[in-house]
Image: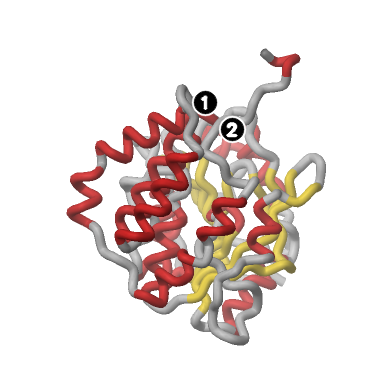
Amino acid sequence: MRDTRTGVVVITHNRRAELDRTLRLLRRLPEQPRVVVVDNASGDGTAAAVRADHPWVDLVVATENLGAVARNVGVERLDTPYVAFCDDDTWWEPGSLARAADVLDAHDDVAVVTARIVVEPAGTEDPIVAELRDSPVQGRSGLPGPALGSFHAGASVVRREAFRSVGGFHPRLWLGGEEELLAADLASQGWELCYLEELTVHHQASTLRDERRRLRDGVRNTLWFTWLRRPLPAALRRTAAVLSDVRPGSPALAGVLAALRGLPWVLRERRVLPPRTEQRFRVLESAQRRSTARRYRLAPRPESSR
């Protein structure tokens, strides 16, 4: 039977073939969720293909590439209590959306549940899963899974009410680590975020992604979040840790420069986290330094591709 508690928002840009695969897989889900696709001004015929091949989808065509803010647009098109985010190169495993809704029904202070991420076509766990599973963040007792400091949008289900209460994704951040600021603002309002082992999202990374831009924007957004919300000692520690991982000539260096150019608006909007929320991020500092799943440098290319 159809489960009407959770809608799905998919954002896309110039990935017509990959989006088609994702929509065909979402169409087969037993939950039969309503799906909203926000096309970020694609120039490859994505919108026309969705209209022709997936008329059951609620399609929104943006006039410019909104980045993560496209998710905000999709959330506003839905009236379901829960919203599952999905990228054009990810898809939810059958039954996961219903299970997520069951957990959110049972825990009314949980705003976000994040799924286990399986990398395709190998079928192996994404390296970040181990960090989610072993999260050192302390949430309230009785949570359905490990408490998190942040989350991965393409692998998470959010409580729509909570998401809207903090304004969704910040337009300045565009894409790349945009979740951290939203997660902090949710936690500041008393919402919990957690990882759920029984949920699964599959991810087959797009071959069309711009790794250099992702790296640049990821560094910029990490620094912006740090300067926007962390108290001065923590902001200095985190900034030093990020800078120590930036190599000369790397796109990450461009991210640092972009972050510095944004300092005027960052200082205008700076609002330090309350102590309880700050503690969630403080305990993550050691794990972030040791992490092999998040590094601000491009992976070396194999000899055969140089």
Q: How many marks?
A: 2
Residue depicted at 60% across the width and 84% down the height: 106
Residue at (72% x, 67% y) in the render: 197
Query: Which quadrant is home to the C terminus?
Result: top right
Q: Secondary structure at mark 1?
A: loop
Question: Is 298 above or below relative to 57?
Answer: above
Q: Are marks 1 and 2 in contact (CB under 8 Å)?
A: yes
Asked which secondary structure carries label 2, the reply is: helix
What numbered label is drawn on residue 44?
Answer: 1
Image position, residue 66 (x, y; %): 38, 42
Quadrant of the image occupied by residue 132: bottom right
| Mark 1 vs 2, N-terminal side | 2
> Is residue 35 visible from the viewing direction of this image?
no
Amino acid beneath label 2: Arg
Please identify the quarter of the rendering in which residue 94 is found: bottom right
User: Front-most of 150 and 48?
Assistant: 150
**Horizontal and vertical percent position of residue 3:** 64, 71
Report the residue at 42% width, 48% height from top.
Answer: 222
The amino acid type, in three-letter code, at marker 1 is Asp
Query: How many neighbours does mark 1 have within 10 angstroms: few (below 14), some (14-19), or many (20 or more)?
Result: few
- Res. 273 visible in picture: yes
Residue 181 in percent (x, y) is at: 39, 58
Q: Residue at x 53, y 68 (%)?
A: 112
Mark 1 and mark 2: Cα distance apart in space: 7 Å
User: Residue 219: x percent and y percent?
Assistant: 43, 41
- Check disc 2 and report the residue beneath it: 16
